[in-house]
Amino acid sequence: MFSSIVVGIDGSDASGRALVLACKIAKAFDAQLQISHTPREETVAYAAEAISGFYIGANLAQQEILEEAAAQVGAQACGVAEREGIEIEEVQIGHGDPATELLALAERAQADLIVTGRRGLGNLGALVLGSTSHQISKHAKCACLTVP
């Protein structure tokens, strides 16, 4: 039924649950699993400012923090996948809009399932359904699974 699955992660609890479920489905169907992570600058800036206690703003240091955070999220995701019995060669790190990046990866991978968390670390204004998962469900050319 599923031969190629793409899962979007952002480090949130919902995306962690989406990753675990995507791994279980991939294992059950012997499907290829690809992980996509597109960090949002405003999320990293917010987290960095909360931790440091001072304004970070848009600068080179923020870009370095963004890249480091993306690598950490990717490494954690690979660890989760490995514990679930799925080998991941590489986490696709995108730049820009997470929904656009995830849809593009799904197209390249000829995915027949996209898995996302319902509410992640993205747009805080999307109270009912996260903006990324909403855009995925509107524009995907394959089945979508949104995990609470």
Image (cartoon, rainbow, N blue to C red):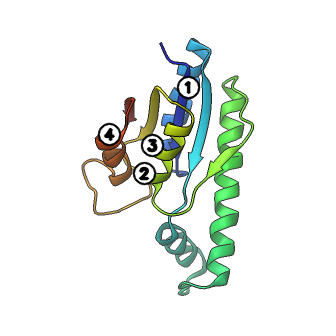
Residue under label 1, please give it: 4
Disc 4 crowd rating (10 Å Cα; few below 14, some 14-19, many 20+) is some
The amino acid on which the numbered mark 2 sits, given as a three-letter code, is: Ala
Residue 30, image x and y in percent?
A: 62, 14
Q: Residue at x 58, y 21 (%)?
A: 26
Q: Position of residue 91 (x, y in %)?
A: 67, 45
Residue at 53 percent of width and 20 percent of height:
25
Looking at the rendered structure, the kind of residue marked 3 is Ala
Tell me how far mark 4 sits from mark 1, CA to CA.
17 Å
Left/right placement of residue 92 relative to residue 107 reads right
Labelled disc at residue 14: 3
Q: Is residue 93 above or below residue 28?
A: below
Q: In the image, is 130 to the left or to the right of 16?
A: left
Q: Are marks 3 and 1 in contact (CB under 8 Å)?
A: no
Q: Nearer the viewer, residue 133 or 105?
A: 105
Earlier-in-chain disc, 3 versus 1 = 1
Q: Which residue is mark 4?
A: 137
